[in-house]
Image (cartoon, rainbow, N blue to C red):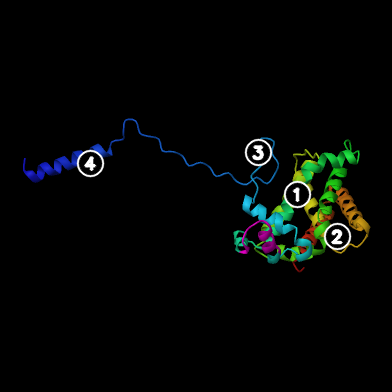
Amino acid sequence: MAPSRALTRITQLRLAQLAKPAANPRPRPRPRPVPLPRRYHSYDHPAPAGIFNPTEQAILAAAYAHVPEHGFTQHALSLGARDAGYLDVSTNLLPEGPFSLIRYHLVTQREALAPRREAIFSEDAAASSPVPARVERLTWERLLGNQQVNHRWQEALAIMAQPSHVPASLHELALLADEIHFQAGDTSVDPTWYTKRGGLSMIYASSELFMTNDRSPGFGETRAFLQRRLAEAGGLSGAVGNVTQWLSFTASAGINVLRSKGVRI
């Protein structure tokens, strides 16, 4: 056999060996699925980790004490960084700037509802009260969480209305509505799960905006406003057959939510 033909034959045999599958092929590792953020309570899975790391938490907690005087501002963040033992430049760790301080308020006030739940209901002898009454009580408790920053909250709403912050603001509003219904003992799993939370989100936002202009003792007018809106929503959601009336109420409430976030309508 000529050398060239021999070399060609050897090459063909080598390629044929490479083309054969291995006797025991090694399985390829499958990529692990990336867990999606959970937007509702679950008894089967642990709660997700907080959105702030320890350094951010320290700066924001210290800065929050300056909000009543300086508002939700970069200056309040700088003061907080100093109080926490960091340089002023450390506020660069918070790329969302003052919105990070607003979100800190939203998150901490929402998370504070669960530890206070037992005290709230035992104090009001509400252990056997219906779910709507509990929803009203918890919603009012959350509104009271704005007392110390109420005079600064319209400034916060203007920041939250910026296009880059609207998705996170509405996400926090949805989480609050779910937290209130969960802590109130609402166990419904039918389509009203969505309508209840959507309606409460709208009512809370409009009540929060009303509160910024309330000068009554103990914000009594705000609570009366909240109770009226919840009563209206309860009556309309009960009349399931009157679709036109329900849609009208939902659209009106939705407009109020957008206005509370600074959108001109």
Q: Residue at point 89% right, 40% down? A: 123
Query: Mark 3 or mark 4: which is in front?
Result: 3
- Residue behind mark 2: 211
x%, y% of residue 98? 68, 63
- Amino acid under disc 1: Arg
- Mark 3 is surrounded, within 10 Å at the Cα level, by few (under 14), some (14 to 19) or many (20 or more) other residues, namely few
Local SS, label 3: loop
The part of the image, by quadrant, that contains residue 183 is top right
The numbered dot on residue 110 is 1
Local SS, label 2: helix
Disc 3 to disc 1, how far (Cα)? 18 Å
- Residue behind mark 3: 46
Q: Give the vertical position of 41 relative to 214 (above or below).
A: above
- Amino acid under disc 2: Met
- Residue behind mark 4: 15
Residue 46 belongs to the span the image colors magenta: no
Which circle's residue, 3 or 1, is located before the other in the chain? 3
Q: Residue at point 67% right, 53% down? A: 58
The part of the image, by quadrant, that contains residue 76 is bottom right
Labelled pair 3, 1 in contact (Cβ < 8 Å)? no
> Most prominent secondary structure in the magenta stretch?
helix
Residue 86 belongs to the span the image colors magenta: yes
